Image: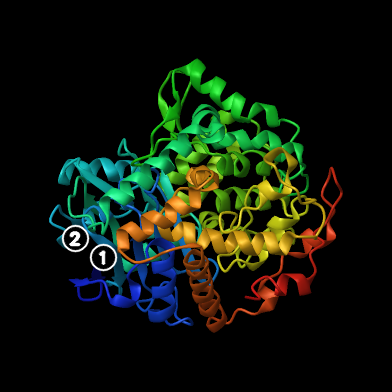
């Protein structure tokens, strides 16, 4: 268990043992607690005082399936608060197999200079000048990096948006095929990486220095039981491999919760053209892959490879949130346009959700027509070129709304909502408003508790039970993100004895007792650190509110508005 500290100011690297206070913590828990402790809450997110932390989950690098999630943390240039952005691919497992608990990037090199960080199979790290790579888009960048330094590396990098330090810049990581198509998209952490002068991190694959397990046999037994539960679940073993996350288009649209045309409607009439069935049919017809392993140790294979009419690769993986953002949200029903926009966002290094919503706000303001796919592509290309309008668009939906003096801007704490309208799913109103992360769906996804199709028992249009549901889920997810477990492998947690299997694995790794109370304590510790940072950064209860549009503009077809009161919002974290 070790930390790698990279000081960009003097270009020095130190490796140190993990301090006792951080033992037993990984992923989001580690990034958030460290940032709250070591980063001045009032600092400039793009300045030298901010830290950029890469942390595998606590269970990453073990034999447990679907634990290749990496947490990347910093103060966000988009929200002004604390941020953890979560990404898959291979880098989390590769770092953990080198015994690296976190890589902490500090300081800032002189403007217009840039470096790459290379970590070899011995766990040793070095900085190298990256002038030849500056400004490159991510796909060409990864090809050149691998040509120069060898194929056997995971690559984590930024594209032009990160170089330009745009507030919606993502950090891209490579999948099992070496493509930079996995995005830590939310919060603009790519801008932090770009500001520090770090173009890419290369991590050697195949390390054999993972943390020692205190009880390997006990761990193996629990890990096998967990994997068996995931394999036996219909959703994770059949539905996701066949349709991917696009399977959500139909039920969310049917619920009237699919925000489209800049969240002026809750149902997209052309949804059947972009849903899971349409996506799978198109991919199969053209010879692409509907079932694709994109992340290390994944047994679900929810990824896909979208190809054009000639069978040529376009993008991987086309997911629900992007299909919404580049589809219904901008009034577009063309899967080829959506796929092209997804590729461009990965290649330029920008968040598909923030970018799609920014395009939607511009269209709503009359800049271009809804449904104009060609215009959307041209707009996103402007971000990659760094034009005057590209700078506005790359700064996010709030900046676009300000530019056009347009009031319908669906953002919270500066970050856009995701693909679930809070007026039709009141529990998501609580999560969007109260999570320290901004308008983030993964922080507390309570859609399943709101919709009968998913076994939910709450009335999605009522306030009753929504605060409790969001609070409990946010606490749970803070712990899940700390473990490095993929969201879609939570079917293993939901199975009989599933949580006990996780407790057993944590205990078998650490050698210390771990149970239900410890799980809850971990979630509270993480959220308290995040809330404390935001409070010291100047956030107040007024920041835990949705834009007026959600309270004042009824959403068809239910013609509903958010009914969660301010008092209820303020009670969310009474723990």
Residue 113 disc label: 1
Residue under the point 70% across and 63% down? 468
Answer with left or right where residue 28 lies relative to residue 325: left
Type of colouring: rainbow
Query: Could you say where residue 43 lies in the image, as x and y percent from the top left?
Result: 45, 80
- The answer to whether marks 2 and 1 mark residues whose Cβ atoms lie closer than 8 Å is yes
Q: Which residue is mark 2?
A: 129
Q: Which label's residue is closer to the chain start, 2 or 1?
A: 1
Q: Is residue 540 visible?
A: yes
* Foreground of the two, 288 or 312: 288
Label 1, residues with CA under 10 Å away: few <14, some 14-19, many ≥20: some
Query: Could you say where residue 342 lies in the image, as x and y percent from the top left?
Result: 50, 40
Query: Could you say where residue 74 lies in the image, as x and y percent from the top left?
Result: 42, 69
Answer with left or right where residue 83 lies relative to residue 452: left
Residue under the point 31% across and 58% down? 509
Q: Could you give the CA–CA distance between mark 2 and mark 1, rounded to whole angstroms?
A: 8 Å
């Amino acid at each position: 268990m070790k930390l790698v500290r990279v000081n960009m100011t003097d270009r020095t690297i130190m490796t140190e043992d993990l301090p006792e206070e951080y033992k037993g913590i990984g992923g989001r828990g580690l990034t958030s607690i460290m940032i709250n402790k070591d980063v001045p809450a009032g600092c400039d997110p793009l300045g030298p005082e901010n830290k950029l932390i890469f942390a595998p989950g606590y269970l990453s690098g073990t034999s447990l399936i679907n634990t290749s999630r990496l947490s990347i943390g910093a103060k966000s240039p988009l929200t002004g608060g604390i941020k953890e952005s979560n990404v898959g691919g291979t880098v989390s497992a590769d770092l953990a197999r080198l015994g690296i608990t976190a890589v902490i990037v500090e300081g800032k090199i002189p403007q217009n200079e840039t470096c790459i960080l290379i970590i070899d199979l011995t766990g040793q790290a070095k900085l190298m000048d990256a002038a030849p790579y500056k400004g490159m888009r991510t796909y060409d960048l990864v090809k050149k990096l691998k040509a120069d330094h060898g194929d056997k590396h995971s690559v984590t990098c930024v594209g032009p948006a990160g170089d330009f330090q745009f507030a919606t810049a993502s950090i891209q990581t490579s999948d099992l095929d070496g493509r930079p198509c996995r995005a830590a998209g939310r919060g603009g952490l790519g801008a932090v990486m770009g500001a520090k002068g770090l173009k890419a991190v290369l991590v050697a694959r195949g390390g054999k220095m993972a943390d020692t397990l205190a009880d390997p046999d006990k761990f193996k037994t629990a890990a096998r039981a967990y994997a068996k539960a995931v394999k036996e679940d219909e959703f994770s073993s059949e539905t996701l491999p066949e349709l991917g996350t696009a399977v959500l288009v139909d039920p969310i649209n049917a619920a009237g919760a699919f925000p489209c045309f800049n969240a002026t409607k809750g149902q997209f009439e052309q949804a059947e053209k972009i849903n899971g069935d349409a996506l799978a049919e198109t991919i199969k017809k053209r010879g692409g892959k509907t079932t694709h392993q994109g992340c290390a140790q994944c047994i679900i294979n929810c990824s896909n490879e979208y190809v054009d009419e000639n069978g040529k690769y376009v993008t991987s993986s086309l997911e629900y949130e992007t299909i919404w953002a580049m589809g219904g949200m901008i009034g577009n029903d063309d899967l080829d346009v959506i796929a092209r926009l997804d590729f461009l966002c990965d290649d330029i290094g920008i968040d598909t959700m923030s970018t799609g919503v920014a395009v939607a706000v511009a269209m709503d303001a009359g800049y271009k027509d809804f449904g104009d796919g060609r215009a959307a592509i041209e707009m996103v290309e402007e971000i990659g070129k760094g034009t005057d309008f590209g700078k506005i668009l790359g700064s996010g939906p709030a900046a676009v709304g300000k530019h056009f003096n347009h009031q319908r801007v669906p953002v919270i704490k500066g970050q856009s909502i995701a693909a679930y309208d809070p007026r039709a799913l009141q529990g998501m109103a609580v999560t969007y408003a109260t999570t320290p992360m901004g308008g983030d769906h993964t922080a507390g996804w309570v859609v399943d508790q709101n919709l009968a199709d998913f076994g939910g028992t709450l009335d999605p249009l009522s306030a009753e039970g929504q605060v409790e549901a969001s609070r409990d889920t946010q606490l749970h997810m803070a712990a899940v993100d700390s473990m490095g477990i993929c969201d879609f492998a939570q079917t293993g947690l939901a199975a009989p004895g599933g949580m006990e299997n996780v407790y057993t694995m944590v205990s078998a790794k650490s050698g210390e007792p771990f149970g239900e109370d410890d799980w809850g304590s971990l979630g509270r510790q993480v959220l308290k650190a995040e809330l404390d940072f935001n409070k010291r950064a100047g956030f107040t209860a007024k920041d835990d509110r949705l834009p007026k549009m959600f309270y004042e503009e009824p959403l068809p077809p239910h013609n509903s508005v958010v009914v969660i009161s301010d008092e209820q919002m303020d009670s969310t974290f009474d723990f």
